Amino acid sequence: MNTKRLKVDSVAEGFLDLLEARGIRYFFGGGAGTDFPPFIEAFAKREAQGRTDGLRPITVIHEITTISMAHGYTMVTGESQAVMLHTVAGTANAVGGIINAARARIPMLVAAGRTSITEKGRRTSRAATIHWAQESFDQAGLVREFVKWDYELRLGEQLETVADRALAIAANPPSGPVYVTFPLDVAGEALPEFEFSARPRLRPSAATQPDPAAVARAAEALVNADNPLIVVSSAGRDTQAVAPLVSLAERLAIPVAESWSAYMNFPHDHPLHQGFEADGLVPEADVILTVESDTPWFPNRAEPPDNATVIQIDDDPLYERYPIRGYPTDIGLAGNAASTLRALGACVAETLTAPVRDVSAIDARRRRWEAAHRRQRRAWNDAARRVSDHCPMDYRWISRCIGDVLGDDDIVVTEISLDPTQTCFRRPGTFFCHPHSGVLGWAPGAALGAKLACPDRTVICAIGDGSHVFGVPTATHFMSRAYDLPVLFVIYNNGSWQRSREATFRYAPGGWAAKAESVPLCELEPSPRFDLICEANGGYGELVEDPGELPAALERALRAVRVEKRQALLNVIARKG
């Protein structure tokens, strides 16, 4: 067996060397604390020895930014990264980000220090008041419900097994974060020599494939359907899934609707694309294919007919980690979306070649949905034009202006703001929306992570003012400057928590809140000058109040990002919904 043997000073140093050997590029250190010294010393040694081309430490000053940066890097590249948190305190700050990563199925190795086990007798023994008060009986209990696996490293001899198991479980579909704790005594344990396998002996499973008989039943149902429908949410997480999805839709002329899309799942200008809500189409469908969609429709608004066949493609079609989810699954195709769609497409093609098949209905259906697509695009264009002079600005106008300046290869990361009806994404890996778990503050850090992964591409973060606050603007802009990650931040600033207002108005239409001049618990006034926070960190900032000035402001901000290579922020004053 091919092994590597390295001279190291500690378990922490061995861990870093192992991560590097396993292809991990970044070690996101969130809020380094008194449990970090063995790791800090190990990185200092690597730097002194000129070992700066491999595993790179990233010093992050808030945990929501830490987790979100790792999340953003992985969602763009598909490559797991490592995070290090400060004991129970850092873990508590990071819980929301870990929940987001879990629901978005982002593989991530989350490590955390733990207070020293010993009170005296070692150089790692407790030496500060926090070392007693900070310890918990079950530190991993903070995150256990949302990580795939957790473990505490107890001996240096376990290091290879624990690290490789963590990385394999994180990547194994459906992927997600894992959590490993390092008591300070163990991390600082002397380890003069560290021997490990050159290639990991623990690996994630190969992409799963559904039962061919189930694929054949699904193909037969789709071919024989009169009014089939495809609903997608996160199929574009794997960029390789988009092409077979398009091919399947085109072959049978199936309309494709997106429900709370988190990725670019299907080209928005494709004639079969039918917008970003499936509720209006579901009641008429006789066969519905959902692809990586946890909420393909909202049952309190619309439901498919009782005799409709629902086919679900997903690594986990039943979403077993959701406490309750009652969406029907008549045919569950458990497997990787890209390979399953290819298998389904091949089976559909074979079924269609049968001489008894009459494909004239497919041609008629294609004409119907292509006409519907054209009507929809015209309606969206008209909507933006009608609000183009509204002041404060309408979300549709802000989104249209962003859409007008986007290049085909630009990346947009958004959180409760960008209106996708006013943009047009065509390429996989260009659009990313907040995880469905809804722990706010994700987008700024995720945008920085995306820029770290793609330094030559323009990254735009479109976010509401309330979400931006949750993302800790000081940490965001500090990181952008410190690591040369020029991102354009566009703040849809309506001085409120818009979604809370909307939910209240749905709950009590025409009620007291709807009539109120100021909605309780939702107003965020007076609004901070977010643009000045960006300027304080060396960026370009601008307050934009006139809708007519927004296009030019975007050009100025993009010049700062693309030419001057510094971050920019537009604080756009928007209307309340």
Image (cartoon, rainbow, N blue to C red):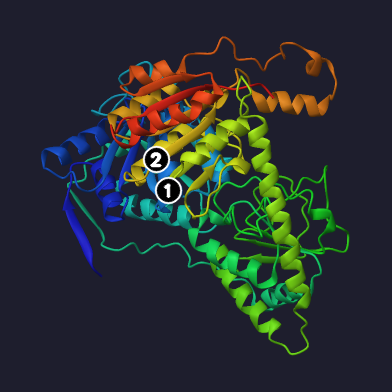
Q: Nearer the viewer, residue 85 or 430?
A: 430
Find numbered disc 2 in the image and state the secondary structure of the residue it sits on.
helix
Tell me the quadrant of the picture where the C terminus can be found: top right
Residue 337 position in % (x across, y down): 57, 63
Is residue 8 placed above or below 386 in the rendered structure? below
Q: Nearer the viewer, residue 59 or 423?
A: 423
Q: Nearer the viewer, residue 151 or 367?
A: 367
Q: Is residue 180 visible?
A: no
* Residue of label 2: 449
- At a point 74% along the width and 46% down the height, the residue shown is 324
Three-letter amino acid code of the residue under disc 1: Thr
- At a point 65% along the width and 56% down the height, the residue shown is 273
The residue lying furthest to the right in this view is 306
Residue 68 position in % (x across, y down): 45, 37
Question: In this rendering, would 518 be left or right of 191?
Answer: right
Mark 2–mark 1 distance (CA, rounded to whole Å) = 8 Å
Instruction: Kindly check if marks 2 and 1 are in contact, taking CB atoms under 8 A apart as contact.
Output: yes
Tell me the quadrant of the picture where the N terminus can be found: bottom left
